[in-house]
Image (tube, rainbow, N blue to C red):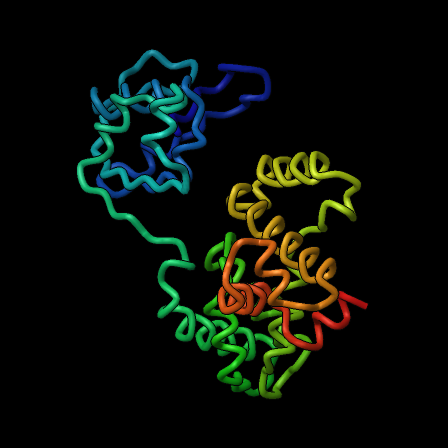
Amino acid sequence: MFGHERGSFTGAEARRIGQFEQAHGGTLFLDEIGDMSLQTQAKLLRALQERTIRRVGGREAIPIDVRVIAATHRDLAAAMREKQFREDLFYRLSVACIRLPPLRERVEDIPKMVRHFLGLQSAEMGIPTPSIQKEAMEFLQEQPWPGNVRELENAMRRALLVRPGYPITLSDVHRAVASSAPATSQQEGSLAALVRENLGRKAREELVGVYAEMLGIMERELFLQAIKLARGNQVQAARWLGISRLTLRHRLRGLGFDGSTLKADLG
């Protein structure tokens, strides 16, 4: 963010102008600011307060005039309570806050996004933009989408690869969504192994939220095992789970289980 002078450390063969200097007179966007280390947070706070920066290895205070926009997927209030994010930096940045709800809370946007992605991806592949069945769209609107818009975009690309130029069916989106889910605990060997794997994916920025991901996996496995134990009797499975049969059927559909997929999984 602040740049460095030539020779300030090993490998610094030339002066480098940092992002604050490059954005002078304009706007600097800082993405995933909640993942910033406390040391870097302190440096950022100083730059915002003093409106000056110093390049690494430099002595000159360089004035900056920059509007900062920051984004994060983390709950910064919780991070402050856990001493992982500075309160003074939070209040310095939060002049105006805009909360963008996760995709599962704005399902009315999904049809427009689906058609947008299908149009873009079809153009890339040089094929006609396919239509999508009503049942398939309803299924997409029932998903939790822990990966938000990026996960939806990738699911549409997978569905399009399977059915290039043809109407996309409920079965197509079932497969597209299911193929993005990580392995179950049985496949990984243990629940602990699955948790470690997903935490590792998060550390590598391959996953947006471990909590939502694990809830989805556990719910899918819980419902499937209940149905198996009840030998396909949904009334009995719902009773064991302490929910209504209607709720069970709704969640099974939301998790991608229909009659044919249930028979395959039970078989």
Furthest toward the top, the residue is 59
Image spot of residue 125 (x, y percent): 61, 77
> In terms of depth relative to the viewer, which is nearer, 243 or 75?
243
Above or below, 29 against 53 in this view is below
Above or below, 3 against 117 in this view is above
Quarter of the view holding residue 66: top left
Q: Is residue 153 visible?
A: no
> In terms of depth relative to the viewer, which is nearer, 204 or 5?
204
Q: Is residue 73 left or right of residue 265?
A: left
Quarter of the view holding residue 228: bottom right
Query: What residue is rendered at 53% in x and 85% in y?
Result: 133
Q: Is residue 132 left or right of residue 51?
A: right
> In terms of depth relative to the viewer, which is nearer, 114 or 47?
114
Furthest toward the left, the residue is 95
Image spot of residue 43 (x, y percent): 35, 19
Q: Is residue 40 left or right of residue 175?
A: left
Q: Quadrant of the C terminus?
A: bottom right
Image spot of residue 10 (x, y percent): 59, 16
Query: What residue is rendered at 70% in x and 70% in y?
Result: 262
Above or below, 221 against 264 in this view is above
Q: Quadrant of the N terminus?
A: top left
Q: Is residue 171 visible?
A: yes
Count of numbered labels shown in the rendering: 0
Query: What residue is rendered at 22% in x and 40% in y?
Result: 25
Quarter of the view holding residue 264: bottom right
Query: What residue is rendered at 77% in x and 43% in y?
Result: 188
> In terms of depth relative to the viewer, which is nearer, 130 or 253?
253
